[in-house]
Amino acid sequence: MFIGHFAVGFAAKRLAPRTSLAPLMLAPLLADVIWPVLVLAGIERARVVEGETPFLHFDLDWYPWSHSLLMMAVWAALFAWVYFRRTGDRPAAAVLAAGVLSHWLLDWITHQPDMALWPDGPELGLGLWYSVPGTIAVEGAMFVAAVAVYARTTRARDRAGTIGFWSFVLLLAASYAASSVSGPPPGVTTVVTTAIVMSALSIVWAWWFDGHREPRAARAREPRA
């Protein structure tokens, strides 16, 4: 899943309106941030395989440390603990933990059976990726609904808050459309380095434009002149 993970980050703003969108977006993307680093380090493995599914042109050969359910629970606990230690915000930390765990659930729905319950444990997957219309319908609906939730939860304080937000949405939509029709990548190294760059760019961009927005409830509580 691609924009479905971003959808979780946008929707999470409703549950933690005072939390920056950067950690809210990083939480559901965390497994895909860890994965390319582990592949480059030789700890996890992937290989290009044309036609594996219409949406994935490489085989996720072995990636239990970033994507198994057990390890995602560990990453969720660590991520939430670090955030809580820095902010003292227990409800937001719980939202972030749920965001990290959501990655396994969404990948279980979309992937072929390669989502392990624990390292070297049983592998599951419902295979939504085998249906192009089904995948686009599910992810597209999630993304549109989540963007609407974020837009209703926050308001722009200036032009950067408006332009930055909507340009980010358009970039994600365009990237998703391009990935849906693209062929196999030239190699695994290209995939993982692109993933690292795009993840970093997305988190920084989300932090930037969200900093130019505010919860709508905050404006409603301001005293009238």
Image: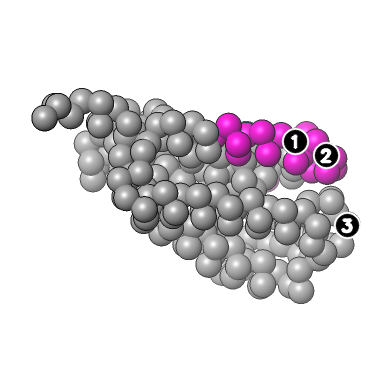
Residue 137 is marked as: 1
Bin the neighbour count of mark 1 within 10 Å (Cα to Cα): few under 14, some 14-19, many 20 and up: few
Residue 175 x, y percent position in the rendering: 65, 57
Residue 133 lies within the magenta run: yes
- What residue is at 37 percent from the left and 36 percent from the top? 154
Report the quarter where the N terminus lies.
top right
Badge 1 marks a residue whose secondary structure is helix
Residue 105 lies within the magenta run: no
Report the quarter where the C terminus lies.
top left
Residue 166 is marked as: none
Residue at the spot of label 2: 133
Picture quadrant of residue 112: top right
Q: Amino acid at mark 2?
A: Pro
Q: Amino acid at mark 1?
A: Ala
In the picture provided, is 3 more to the left or to the right than 76?
right
Q: Amino acid at mark 3?
A: Gly
The image shows residue 153, relative to residue 37, as above or below, that is above
Alpha carbons under labels 2 and 1: distance apart: 6 Å
- What residue is at 55 percent from the left and 49 percent from the top? 169
The image shows residue 77, relative to residue 65, as above or below, that is above
Q: Nearer the viewer, residue 148 or 27?
A: 148
Tag 2 near tag 1, CB within 8 Å: yes
